[in-house]
Image (cartoon, rainbow, N blue to C red):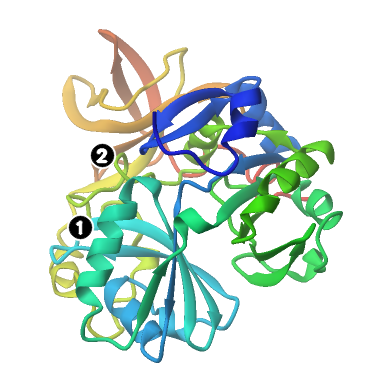
């Protein structure tokens, strides 16, 4: 038996439970494709309480986060959020994170469930010479993600803050039902949406059930994985790990090389002009569904490998993320070996769907 979030009771009533990152979590409720399309067309609600949530506070909290991440965290405005990377000394990615600045001397960092223990040990080791306090609230709080074009309409009915003025990658303190929450507007699906983070854990089930009664579909890990692949978003242990650097992963936007010293900076300055492979998309043109580890060919020459692959209900095709040589062009035809068969695909950009129809940029 794995660890359980505060919402395990409702998951066990409604969902198909699997073990993920040491937690018993719902893989799906009614079905993965149905849950994906609910998020794309209306709204879905996810329990993401298994993820790590850590508070950094003190006079040098911002300076410390500048040093242990790839971004210039100390320059964030209060209630601003930013995607960042934790790197090792060789420039490899230890994890990708979201940082929210709470006030002048307080920041919340959210990181992957699989890396909770590893990351805490890493930041505590490097914090010894900084005036910073680190408080792990992962098991003392809940985190619910509401994603999809109807998210704002649904959440507004049980939230005391005006959500239409909350911009993307911003946050606010407010009440959802009777729970005091940090409400952020980010996400891992490509859609508009919100995260509710609160230490009022006794309120989690009430909020969950309310969101569903207001029209959100409960969605599990399966839908979350398909949605993030459709959006071209990396997952630790698949597209990113300690042997892959941000330039290969297409995450150079999250690296501020011009800032002061940070872990991995020297290595990245050396690596940035020596990239031979790049994370790219593959959109299958036949019926094949690519999966992690499948080999990618150009004619009869092996050129890369799939890191994540799935069937996309949004575009009704097999799609994949893969590492391919930097010279490969968008639209180029490739072959994916699927169970001994040669299945054709084309190199694609991210996201895989039409952004005028789906995603947070969609035309209303």
Quarter containing the N terminus:
top left
In the shown orientation, is residue 268 left or right of residue 77? left
Element type at marker 2? strand
Q: Which of marks 1 and 2 is nearer the N terminus?
A: 1
203 and 19: which one is in front?
203
Image spot of residue 179 (x, y percent): 72, 60
234 and 172: which one is in front?
172
Badge 2 is on which residue? 324
In the shown orientation, is residue 304 left or right of residue 6? left
Q: Is residue 290 above or below residue 306?
A: above
The residue at the far bottom in this view is 59
153 and 211: which one is in front?
211
Q: Nearer the viewer, mark 1 or mark 2?
A: 1
Residue located at (14% from left, 59% from top):
274
Report how far apart the C-alphas of labels 1 and 2 lie in the structure: 18 Å
Residue located at (48% from left, 38% from top):
4
Element type at marker 1? loop
Q: Residues within 10 Å of mark 2 (few under 14, many from 20)?
A: many
Say which quarter of the image contains residue 320. top left
In the shown orientation, is residue 111 left or right of residue 192? left
Q: Can residue 121 be seen in this view?
A: yes
How many numbered badges does the structure rendering display? 2
Q: How crowded is mark 1: few (under 14 residues within 10 Å), some or many (20 or more)?
A: many
Image spot of residue 162 (x, y percent): 82, 68
Residue located at (27% from left, 39% from top):
323
Badge 1 is on which residue? 92
Image spot of residue 153 (x, y percent): 83, 52
Q: In this view, does 62 lie above or below 228?
A: below
The residue at the far front in this view is 202
Say which quarter of the image contains residue 257. bottom left
Residue located at (40% from left, 29% from top):
19
């Amino acid at each position: 038996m794995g660890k359980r979030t505060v919402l395990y009771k409702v998951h066990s009533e409604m969902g198909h439970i699997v073990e993920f990152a040491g937690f018993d979590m719902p893989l799906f409720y009614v079905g993965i494709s149905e849950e994906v399309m609910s998020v794309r067309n209306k709204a879905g609600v996810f329990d993401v309480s298994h993820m790590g949530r850590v508070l950094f506070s003190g006079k040098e909290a911002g300076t410390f986060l500048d040093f242990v991440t790839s971004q210039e965290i100390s320059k964030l405005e209060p209630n601003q959020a930013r995607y960042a990377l934790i790197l090792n000394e060789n420039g490899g990615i230890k994890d990708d994170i979201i940082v929210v600045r709470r006030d002048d001397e307080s920041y919340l960092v959210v990181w992957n469930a699989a890396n909770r223990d590893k990351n805490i040990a890493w930041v505590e080791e490097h914090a010894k010479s900084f005036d910073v306090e680190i408080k792990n609230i992962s098991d003392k709080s809940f985190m619910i993600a509401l994603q999809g074009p109807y998210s704002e309409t649904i959440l507004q009915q049980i939230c005391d803050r005006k959500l239409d003025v909350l911009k993307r990658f911003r946050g606010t303190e407010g009440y959802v039902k009777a729970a005091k929450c940090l409400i952020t507007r980010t996400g891992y699906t490509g859609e508009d949406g919100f995260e509710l983070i609160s230490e009022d854990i006794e309120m989690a089930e009430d909020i969950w059930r309310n969101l569903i009664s207001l029209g959100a579909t409960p969605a599990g890990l399966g839908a979350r994985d398909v949605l993030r692949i459709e959006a071209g978003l990396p997952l630790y242990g698949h597209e990113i790990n300690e042997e892959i650097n941000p330039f290969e992963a297409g995450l150079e936007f999250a690296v501020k090389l011009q800032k002061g010293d940070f872990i991995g900076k020297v290595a990245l300055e050396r690596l940035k002009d020596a990239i031979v492979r790049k994370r790219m998309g593959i959109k299958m043109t036949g019926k094949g569904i690519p999966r992690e580890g499948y080999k990618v060919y150009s004619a009869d020459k092996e050129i890369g490998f799939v890191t994540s692959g799935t069937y996309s209900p949004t575009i009704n095709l097999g799609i994949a993320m893969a590492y391919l040589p930097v010279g490969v062009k968008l639209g180029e035809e490739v072959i994916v070996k699927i169970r001994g068969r040669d299945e054709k695909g084309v190199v694609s950009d991210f996201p895989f769907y039409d952004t005028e129809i789906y995603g947070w940029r969609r035309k209303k």
